[in-house]
Image (tube, rainbow, N blue to C red):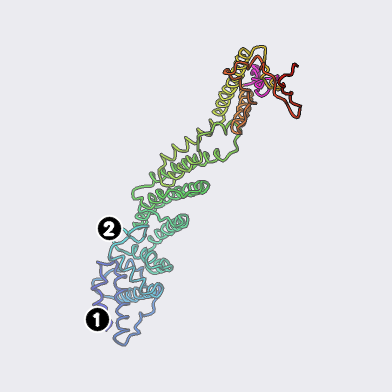
Amino acid sequence: ELTIVHEASHAWFNPDLFVGRWINEGFADEYASRVLDEVSVGRLAPDTVTPTSKGAIELNLWTHPGRIADDKTDQREHFGYEASWTIVRTLLDEIGEESMRAVLAAAHANETAYRGAGKRETVAITNDWRRFLDLLEESGGSSGAETVFRNWIVSDEQVALLDVRRDARGAYASLLDAGKGWQPGYVIRDPLGRWEFARATTEMAEATAVLALRDEIASRAAELAVAPPTTLRVAYEGATDGLESVHALAETQLATATDLDAAAAKVAAERDVFAAIGLIGEDPGAELAAASASFSAGDTAAADAGADSVAAVMTGAADTGRTRALVGGLAGVGVIVLGAGGAVAVRRRRQRFVGPLMTWAPAHASVDPVEAHEPVAETPDPSASVDDRAAAAALRTSALLAKFRAGASPAPIPEPPNQSEPYATLGDPRPPEPVGDAPAEPEHAEGDDR
């Protein structure tokens, strides 16, 4: 029964699936025995053999003998069948039927053993013992397959190849850990699947450098309180021909993040009075936020322009403030001088109008209201430095602005006399009206000669 079902199972387990006699014979025996477990006596198992049994041979060297004409060939054939069955059963017991089904499905579909971030790529690689080992570990999750292959399958020359593979897979595992969820691109996974370990190792070194730059970018982005661009991950995981362009993108993003971080430090730094004056009408914080948003979206050109603009504004703020203070202070002095001159002119016109007789003027008019309330303009000291003069001018301007905002004004100037009254300046010749309780003048009686 086992032989019949075994031969029938070769409809599936044949060189169209795997190239390697031991692989197909081992699968045929194991799955035939499992069928018989369900439909017949079952509990069939391979004869006990070890790698040192009679007729033992590395199974990668086990080929069709043609015809069996001697004991040595017969022993080798017996060992080959029983060892192949033993190996396949050992692997199935380790990973289970479901995982082995995934291994066989990936082999049938020619899918790469090393999966990336997207859909699994198809490969034009012969499904030999190397593909079988990769699929067992990557699709089936086996941890003992390599040891089985070393003990039973590979030749002495092939053991050295397994050593190189082990080192490359160790580097690949480290790359996955460093990726923190970022999957290596096909530029790395393809040579691994082809067992081109030198090329794979070179690309993994480049990928490690890219991930180091990614971590620096993420640190800078965290300081800016924005998410790092997603474009680098897309480029990293989608790399197929090389990582040079991905590395260049990472360096560009890091340089932009560094510039933004420097601009942010300038915005957050303490400002003196001149810098504060120089930033009037500017909003470097908003401009920095817009540049950071452009960076997060992957637009490094816009982010660079924004960072440069913010840095320029902040760097030149103090000089701009000194210029504004100096110009504003000189203008304030001019306003004071013009105001004082205007007040003097008004006083002179009033004096010409009133003349020497000012019986209408209030008693307190002896003190000129302009002189009492107007500040006297000071002449700038030519020996003072530009910064000192700018500071003094800024203080005077600030004082004037403060009075203006508070609504302060000089003492009111008395109104001139109404020119329609002819006696306004000469005194009224009419007798004054009685004041208080003074007795009234007696009326003149008729016939009174007084």
Viewer-nearest residue: 233 or 29: 233
Say above or below: 41 vs 119.
below
Instruction: Measure the C-alpha gap from mark 2 to mark 1.
Output: 33 Å
Q: Which structural element holds mark 2? A: loop
Horizontal placement of 359 versus 213: left or right?
right
Would you name the residue on which mark 1 appears?
4
Quadrant housing residue 142: bottom left
Say above or below: 284 vs 70.
above
Say above or below: 113 vs 346.
below
Would you name the residue on which mark 2 appears?
124
Query: What kind of residue is marked 1?
Result: Ile
Q: Which structural element holds mark 1? A: helix
Quarter in which the C terminus is drawn? top right
Which of labels 2 and 1 is toward the front?
2
Q: Number of labelled discs? A: 2
Extreme residue toward the bottom, this view: 41
Quadrant housing residue 165: bottom left
At horizontal 52% and vertical 42% (from top left) the residue drawn is 261
The residues colored magenta run 366-385
Say above or below: 345 vs 126.
above
On the image, the x and y values in percent for residue 246 come to 39, 46
Query: What kind of residue is marked 2?
Result: Ala
Horizontal placement of 265 versus 112: left or right?
right
Viewer-nearest residue: 379 or 94: 379
On the image, the x and y values in percent for residue 254 come to 47, 43
At horizontal 39% and vertical 79% (from top left) the residue drawn is 48
Q: Residues within 10 Å of mark 1 (few under 14, many from 20)?
A: few
On the image, the x and y values in percent for residue 252 come to 43, 41
Horizontal placement of 410 versus 209: left or right?
right
| Secondary structure that dominates the magenta span | loop
Viewer-nearest residue: 313 or 242: 313
At horizontal 44% and vertical 38% (from top left) the residue drawn is 304
